[in-house]
Image: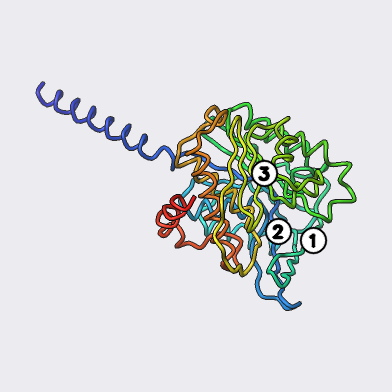
Amino acid sequence: MVGFFVQLHLICVLWRIIIFVCIQTDTIMRRVFGLGETVLDLIFKDDQPVGAKAGGSALNALVSLARMGANAHFITEVGKDRVGDMMVHFLEQNDLSTQYVNRFDGGKSALALAFLNDNNDADYEFFKDYPTQRLTGEIPVFTADDMIVFGSFFGINPVIRPGLLDVLGAAKKAGAIIIYDPNFRKHHDHHKHQFIEVIEENFRWADIVRGSDEDFMNIYGLSQPQKVYDKVSAFCDNLVVTANAKGVYVFGKNFERHFHVPVIEPISTIGAGDNFNAGMMKALLDLNLKRSDLLELSSDQWQQLAVYGIEFSSEVCLNLDNYVPIDFKYRFDELVGHQLKEN
């Protein structure tokens, strides 16, 4: 009989330990999702190839998060070809779940040629051969602990729209945090009148909108962040505008603030905005914020989101990769601590 009570006591102690560990690791267990296109980026400088990297806006963010230890999953599509094999292998090497990667027949994996100018900003040419049916893979069973980022042309492409709305609808219904990055480039201008309504619908889906000053100039023809917020706030309360060396502007319900960015000499700006998104998502994890918390973020919470984003974005500009280096997680706390003091 004594042995029974000893066993029962040990079981109770074990359960307490399990519950404690689960609470302590809550930010690790939460899932982050990316919804977007996968491309092979072929990078050129002075018209000479200097690198080839797995790319795509959501992919860049999710690889960085996975390298920081996040439970990362990518919803995308690649062909059943050699480039597709390379992309899937790369994701798996970086501990990023490929459960929701759809492999398609009847087309080829996408290529993007990125030409770096004197400032190491990229101009793109895309080569795509997709099948008729798009984004037909498995939809995750989302929970309120999850968050998802989407955007770019993938977010407004009418061919993809039905499947994309299915995924966003499932995430929204479950209470997951949704982050939207329009990433709307100049070469989309001649179709702008077709896309404004869809972009604004995406604003409505989002809990946070993050875009560059260039994006909003291309969308609305506006250069002043406050005027941009006047437009976006009709659909989403939380806006982040990244403006290169001019800094970062954040707007929330009854809140606005400007953050300075460090002066750096970029090697490549490919993935800078994508990694700002990754930094914000990392901050949301570390702060353990849920969708209801985003209704009115505090000044300190906004500061952490902005500073994390700045550090991720700055780091990726210092190399030719589209994502933070693997050792970044070991330097991150010190870098963030310095930036929090600066801002």
Crowd tier of the residue under label 3, counting other residues whose Cα lies within 10 Å: few below 14, some 14–19, many 20 or above: many
Q: How many marks?
A: 3
Q: Are marks 1 and 2 in contact (CB under 8 Å)?
A: yes
Q: Nearer the viewer, residue 71 or 134?
A: 71
Residue 126 has which mark?
Answer: 1
Q: Nearer the viewer, residue 137 or 217?
A: 217
> Which sits earlier in the primary sequence, circle 2 or circle 3?
2
Q: Measuring 70% from the left and 32% from the top, which residue is drawn there?
A: 233
Q: Which residue is mark 2?
A: 39
Q: Quick one: SS at disc 3?
A: strand
Residue 220 at what x, y percent from top left?
81, 43
Residue 242 at what x, y percent from top left?
65, 50
CA gap between label 1 and label 2 equals 9 Å
Residue 150 has which mark?
Answer: 3
Q: Nearer the viewer, residue 65 or 37?
A: 65
Q: Quick one: SS at disc 2?
A: strand
Q: Is residue 277 above or below residue 10?
A: below
**On-image quarter of the N terminus:** top left
Q: Measuring 47% from the left and 53% from the top, which residue is drawn there?
A: 342
Q: Amino acid at mark 3?
A: Phe
Crowd tier of the residue under label 2, counting other residues whose Cα lies within 10 Å: few below 14, some 14–19, many 20 or above: many
Q: Are marks 2 and 3 in contact (CB under 8 Å)?
A: no
Q: Measuring 35% from the left and 38% from the top, which residue is drawn there?
A: 24
Q: Is residue 242 above or below residue 318?
A: above
Q: Amino acid at mark 2?
A: Val
CA gap between label 2 and label 3 equals 15 Å
Q: Amino acid at mark 1?
A: Phe
| Residue 187 horizontal side relative to residue 16, left or right | right
